[in-house]
Amino acid sequence: MPALVNYGGDDDFCSGGSFYKNSADLGRLCSISSQLDVYCPPRKRARISAPFIFGETEIEQNKQPSIHVLPDECLLEIFTHIYGGRERSSCACVSKHWLMLLTSIHKGEYESSKMVKENIRSSSADVEMFSSEEEDGYLTRCLEGKKATDTRLAAVAVGTSGHGGLGKLSIRGSTSSRGVTNFGLSAISRCCPSLKVLSLWNVPRVGDEGLSEIAKECHLLEKLDLSQCPLVSNKGLIAIAENCPNLTSLSIESCPKIGNEGLQAIGKLCPKLQSVSIKDCPLVGDHGVSSLLSPASSILSKVKLQGLSITDFSLAVIGHYGKSVTNLMLSGLQNVSEKGFWVMGNALGLQRLVSLTITSCSGVTDVSLEAIGKGCKNLKQMCLSRCCFVSGDGLVAFAKSAGFLECLQLEECNRVAQSGIIGVLSNCGLKSLTLVKCMGITDISLEVPFSSPCNSLKSFSIRNCPGFGTVSLAMVGKFCPQLQHIDLSGLCGITDAGLLPLLQNCESGLVKVNLSGCLNLTDETLVSLTRLHGATLELLNLDGCRRITDASLVAVADNCLFLSDLDVSRSAITDVGVAALSQAGQLNLQVLSFSGCSGVSNKTLTFLQKLGKTLVGLNLQHCNSISTQTVELLVESLWRCDILF
């Protein structure tokens, strides 16, 4: 129980114990219910077992302890005169009944709180005497799974009193029959008025009553996160809006009873709202979303709308009145057409928009994408995922309009071809380009001569695009000479002949290189890579490059000066390569992975111990030639390093 009230001890409880009859033993901890058992110090066994002790009557023996004689009214009066949170925590340890009585008392009803207010008016010395009762909401508590019960919430409510005050509470996965209910939240509301952040995930037994109690008492609430709360409806959200004017962040996901009425109250009564995220709420429509972007008072800067039944009207409102929006995320909006995105761009209200993410929206076409580029002049980051009607022509038109675009990410946009990518690079100052699963890219040689090279591009990532091959890679290397980060993971068709021209054309020096899954690369590429870029290379990932041997590690040891992260998992390296790494005086590796390397054996023990002087992470998973005893020796000697085996 002391752990539950945050006063000492741990979370491991033992059953046993009962109440003592004399007042001297009342401070000891004892079992308070069948559901919550706490530690009880062992007692001496009676020497004589008899129905009664000499000198006492049977009536006296059957008499209940005095602790149970006082009615609740008297106990409550006593509790309100207890000075500090530490003393109240001690009382909560006596029994579950006392704990529940303490949670029924509002923070302001304690006599000590009244004394604080009186002394603030009288003298500064008295203020210092009672200042420990002031709460600023410093403490954070998270209850998950079986630990998320009303009893634990009650203990948290009492225990945080006088210790800085509860500022953040997260309840996750309370699905059992003993899970959190409205009673638990009510206890928090009465005892923790300092609460600023509340997160409720998958709590099916909490409804409007509990949320309303939080709203009535916790007026400092700033962030509310509701996910999978089937009993919370507009009523609870309206209570939050009416009582929590400081609300700055609201996140609602999979709450089937929350709709437009609750969001309208939030938009009207919470003028400080800056971030809104709404996902998979079937009752939320255009009226609810549009009310959050009031033309008079909205200062919303982050908006996420996912899986909603909103129409073009909502996007038109965002385009007209989203003057403070800097981050916008739209996903799974099946009822929004091309017109909605076109109006959102042409409304010219998203002048401050910096980051835009659009996922699985069939309304995004070449026409609407060009309009967005023209209307969002300050857009720097753009992510398009599973937008099947966007082609290379639309991307080029968008790139010409969005003059400040720096980062572009395309995922499963299968109408985008190689010419579209080259067109984008030719028409804007991109710094980062990411392509993921874009099946429309084919490995063909363009006959059209290149314009001036794209010197702005620093990071190029193309993952799992099977049509991107040797010709395309050589083209990128020729067109983008200032690359520093390249990620070609999952490109099985890449060969040494395709990658070498890119390595030779990178003038600034590569810093991060990810070649995981490039099955056809050999030591020839790695030797050239380390020779050309060893002075700048910091990260090298060769996971799954099965034709990479010890020769590559020898080249790494000879040429890489600043390499800190090396992954050669599932390659053909052996103990010889590990030995070469350990003999490199200039290497300061921090993360090293040999996962799935059957050629690495127990012979590498001394080499790994030498490398381990700088390592903080070592992956030896699925290294079948390394014994458990060797790993144990490594764990003992490399105590600062996290070892996976």
Image: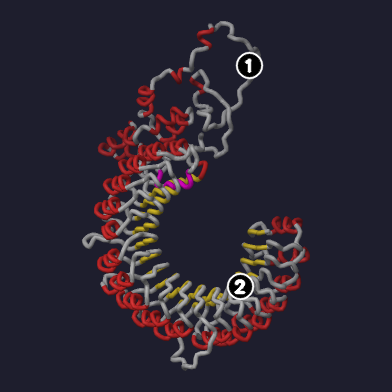
| Apparent side of residue 538 relative to residue 627 in the rendered image (left or right) | left
Q: Residue furthest right?
A: 603
- x 39%, y 57%: residue: 279
In this rendering, the answer to whether 296 lies above or below 449 is: above
Disc 1 packing (10 Å; few <14; some 14–19; many ≥20): few
Q: Nearer the viewer, residue 108 or 596?
A: 596
Within-10-Å neighbours for mark 2: few <14, some 14–19, many 20+: many
Stretch in magenta: 166-174
Residue at point 65%, 76% (across, down)? 519
Residue 533 seen anywhere in this rendered image of the structure: yes
* Image position of 526 (left or right of 329): right
Q: Which element is circle 2 on?
A: loop
- Marking on residue 516: 2
The disc labelled 2 sits on which kind of residue?
Answer: Ser
Is residue 287 positioned above or below 105 on the image?
A: below
Image quarter of the C terminus = bottom right
Q: CA–CA distance between discs 2 and 1?
A: 72 Å
Q: In the rendering, at what x and y percent does residue 570 appear?
A: 68, 69
The residue pinned by badge 1 equals 46
Classified by dominant secondary structure, the portion drawn in magenta counts as strand
Of callouts 2 and 1, which one flags the residue occurring earlier in the amino acid sequence?
A: 1
Q: Residue 209: give x, y in percent of width and height.
A: 34, 40
